[in-house]
Image: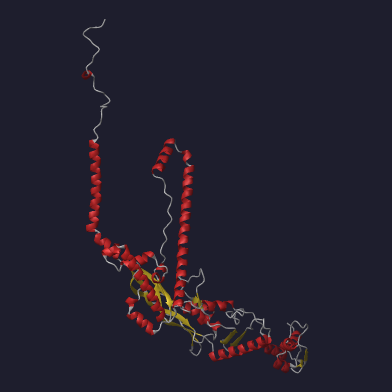
Amino acid sequence: MFDSTHSNSFDWRDIAADPWGDTGPTDSRGRLWLGGALFVVLLGIVFCRLVWLHYWQADEFRRIAAQPIERELPLPGIRGRILARDGSVLAVDEQLASLAVRYRWLEDPPNPAWLRQQARTRLTGAARRDPQRLKAAERDVLAERAEMHVRLAKLCEISLPEWTQRTRRIQQRVEAISRRVNERRLVKAALAAEQQRAERAQDSSSTAQLTWRERLLGDLSEALWPEQQPALPPPIVVAEELDAHVVAAELSLEAVAQIGAHSDDFPGVEIVPQWRRRYPAAALASHVLGHLGAPEKGTATANSEQLPARVGRMGIEHYYERQLRGQPGVKVEVMHRDGALVSTRRQREPTVGRDLVLSLDLALQRTAEALLDSACQRRDALSAADRPSAGGAAIVLDVHSGAVLAAASEPRFDPNLFSAATGDNTSEVAALLADPAHPLFDRTSRMALPPGSVFKPLTAIAILSHGASPQTAVSCQGYLARPDAMRCAIFTRLGHGHGEVDLFAAMAQSCNVYFFHAAAELGP
């Protein structure tokens, strides 16, 4: 039996407290206040940083933003002169006044960012935010640029189509440079991305050695922060897109004065000095002097500096390049961040190379070339019409000193063709290179030619030295043994020989067969 004093009811207050803590609802207001306070603190830190930058660092940032960019540009050295033995000038650098235009001012179609910047400089605060006024300002810039090109073409005394053709060639060259540079950057970026993928693949292959916890953490990290694919590098602006490019050379004094006096009407236009190699005697001794051209790829100077834009490619200009070439100078250009030129200054002046005095006698050189030309013309008159023009060489030496008094090579060329300041004679140079007569080939030093009749006096001296009689006659039929070899010139032209000839007649008529017989009798 149960005690009646006990019942099945209970008093909840008699239950002991839960030893595991309160299981009732939790008051989260404290944590919310704490999170809000932390957010306010962080926001206050950011705000204080902004205030500090605005009031204490703003001037410094404005100064840095307004600070112009300086870049160094090379100034070509001045080449030394080449003189004849009498002091006559055979090659000299002459200074020209050339017209150069900033690339953005001749680019077509224009660069959008540049055009927008030019339009914004013409407007004030509120107007810059008006799309219609901004478009109108851009149209004004383009119209003024087109009008400026017309005036420049007239001042340079060239037609507008020729002006447009020159600017288009400049743009094509700059675009090719920019394309090559950016393609190389893309190739490097692709190689770097491929290397990263290979490293990730190697890392993933090693995950088999990790514990399940490490793999789980790795998968979770990859899910939360997925690895981004490397973005392609943005295209860069090459230096040529900020440079001024020569469009016309040899400006007249009137054009230079007009542009200099109204420089505000010609934005982006500069009058730049240029040095051009001039050969006053034109084709005279052209193979001896040589010509200038672009340096070969991979060529460096002795001190590993860059070669100038044009170096000697043959003749004296090439063999004495180091002596003739002057040391380059340095020009510093100060530019705004938007590419506008502020000022220029010369940090180091270029130097002049050494002069060279040759042993050439100009009067004798002209005579040798005239005689050689006449001989080649006579040869061409007797040759078939489909045969290339005859060529030859003539050299006159001082027997006492060995000095070269004349060195003529036929055909010749005018080295001034390779010295054009703007490169507008490419068709003439191409025709010269394609000439089947090879006028650039120096036959005085690069061609193996038999001495011919020049050597006959030496053979005659040898004959007399061995006691042979000069009256001894030899029968010349025009050739020695076969009609197709070892012949006289008269046989090739007329088909017969000289007949009976002695030493005197052989020298006078230049009989080859006589000297062939004499040389065979004398022996080696």
Instruction: Give the percent coordinates (x, y) of residue 162.
Output: 46, 77
The structure residue drawn at horizontal position 25% and vertical position 44%, both measured from the top left corner, is 39
Q: How is the image coloured?
A: secondary structure
Task: Give the camera-side residue of 82 and 224.
Answer: 224
Residue 143 lies left or right of residue 455; in this view the side is left
Task: Work out whether residue 111 can be spotted.
Answer: yes
Residue 118 in sight = no
Q: Quadrant of residue 334?
A: bottom left
Quarter of the image with the N terminus is top left
Above or below, 101 relative to 65: below
Q: Is residue 360 left or right of residue 6?
A: right
Foreground residue among 356 and 120: 120
Quadrant in which residue 248 is drawn = bottom left
Which quadrant does the C terminus fall into? bottom right
Residue extending furthest top?
1
Residue 266, percent from left and from top: 35, 76
Q: Nearer the viewer, residue 289 or 464?
A: 289
Q: Residue 165 at what x, y percent from top left?
A: 46, 74
Task: Please indicate whether residue 434 sits to the left or right of residue 329 in the image.
Answer: right
| Residue at x 28%, y 65% (from the top left corner) | 127
Direction front: furthest residue = 132
**Numbered label tally:** 0
Q: Position of residue 500 (x, y in %)?
A: 77, 93
